[in-house]
Amino acid sequence: MVLLAACTSLGPLSLNLYLPSIPEVQLHFAATVAEVQTTVSLALLAFGLGLVLLGPLTDRYGRRPCLIGGLALFIAGSALAAPAPSLQVLALARVLQSVGCAIAFISARAMVSDVSPREELPRSVAQMTMIMLVVQMVAPLLGNMIMAAGGWRAIQYFGAVLSVSLLVGVSLAQPETLPTAHRSERDRPVTEFLRPTMAVLSRPGFPILLLQAGLLYSAYPAFLSIAPHLMVEAFGRPPTEFAYYFVFLPAGYFAGNAFVLKYGSRFGQDRLVSAGAKFAVFSCLLSILLIAMGVRHPLALFIPAGAMLNIGLGLALPTVSARAVTQSTPHVGSGWGLVGCAQQVMAAVSVQTLGLFSADSPFPVLVLCTGSLLLVVTFEYSRRSARGA
């Protein structure tokens, strides 16, 4: 479980290690904010598309070969990123890393599903999620330490060493979990394996659920991608200080998830989604008010739009995702792939959109997050009204 959780954490870890180094990367290549944002947005897009397009390969060729292949691709991307002579090469390398992370993520998740009894699967997934949250909390601090020792390139070398270690561990200790008899027929066209995905996508109301999941999730990476720039340009702080405030985000999301686990059955899905989205909107508006009043401290951003916003996301996002996956039955794997793809694609759009604005003010990211969350509230109201009618 620890090994597989480490493989699924590789994507979040590589992103959160990289974030504190973004201002240094921008300075090194004399790039604009919009240009350096492509190293984040393209990676998110590649991860999302990889979940949908490459996920069926684990059913066709087995989990272990795909997991090994994903780790190998991440190693190749890291080897290209570390000595990257230009921002374009770095962006390409991060795309390779993200495709490798997508294959590793879905292969490891599938392995957990293969070996966990049905009644134990939610607990297994929860354990993996908890490990991922811990990794996200410590990653920026670790990134600061690595960057202090060797600059932004050292972070890429560290990713290569880590993925090599995981590859060795998988090769030596992780057996195949999908019997040959249960694999998809290899002589069938690859397009046949995407048929369940298209069937799920065409179900009534499913695209709206994907929009809600994508809009909710996009607030998180949008905030993360611009926060290191804001630390420097809006608050006059060193970019490495971002790591100390970052812990508010996963801590808030953890609190929201904990509430759902303990009290979710009492409140019901409709109330959780509505309350979570509205609370997230309130948190953004509170941050806007504080900054408009002249409060120029990172806590005016990271407590309302960091911790509080993520409490709202923790209430609403798992519930919306569960709705979408439940509606995708019996093609649950395709449902998870589509949810993940929607989240990453919309996150990529949000991240790149923020690159068009100056980073000397937090208002653009706060307005973007507020608008996305208000759309979620509007979709939820329309859904409930249509169901009542």
Image (cartoon, rainbow, N blue to C red):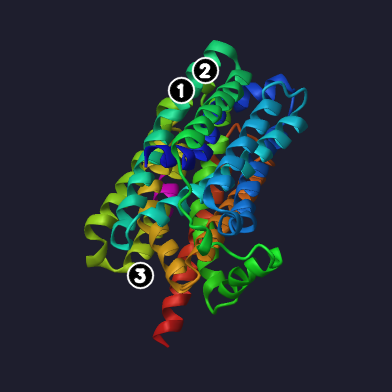
Residue depicted at x 49% and y 20%:
144
SS of the residue at dot 2?
Answer: helix
Q: In the image as oriented, which residue stretches furthest toward the front? A: 181
Q: In the image as oriented, which residue stretches furthest toward the bottom? A: 389
Residue depicted at x 59% and y 75%:
199
Residue 29 picture location, percent across and down: 74, 23
Q: Which residues are magenta?
A: 281-286
Q: Which residue is labeled 3 in the image?
A: 270
Mark number for residue 296?
none
**Label 2 close to label 1 by CB (< 8 Å):** yes
**Label 3 close to label 2 by CB (< 8 Å):** no
Mark number for residue 142?
1
- Taking the image as drawn, is residue 297 in sight? no
Task: Using a 10 Å C-alpha cutoff, classify the residue at mark 2 as few (fewer than 14 neighbours), some (14 to 19) or many (20 or more).
Answer: many
Task: Using a 10 Å C-alpha cutoff, classify the residue at mark 1 as few (fewer than 14 neighbours), some (14 to 19) or many (20 or more).
Answer: some
Q: Which residue is labeled 2 in the image?
A: 146
Residue 60 picture location, percent across and down: 60, 59
Give whichever of 264, 50 is nearer the camera.
50
Judged by depth in the image, the label closer to the viewer, 3 or 2, is 2
- Taking the image as drawn, is residue 370 in sight? yes
Assess whether residue 16 is covered by the magenta stretch: no
Q: Is 344 placed left or right of 8 in the picture?
A: right
Indicate the amino acid at tag 1. Answer: Leu
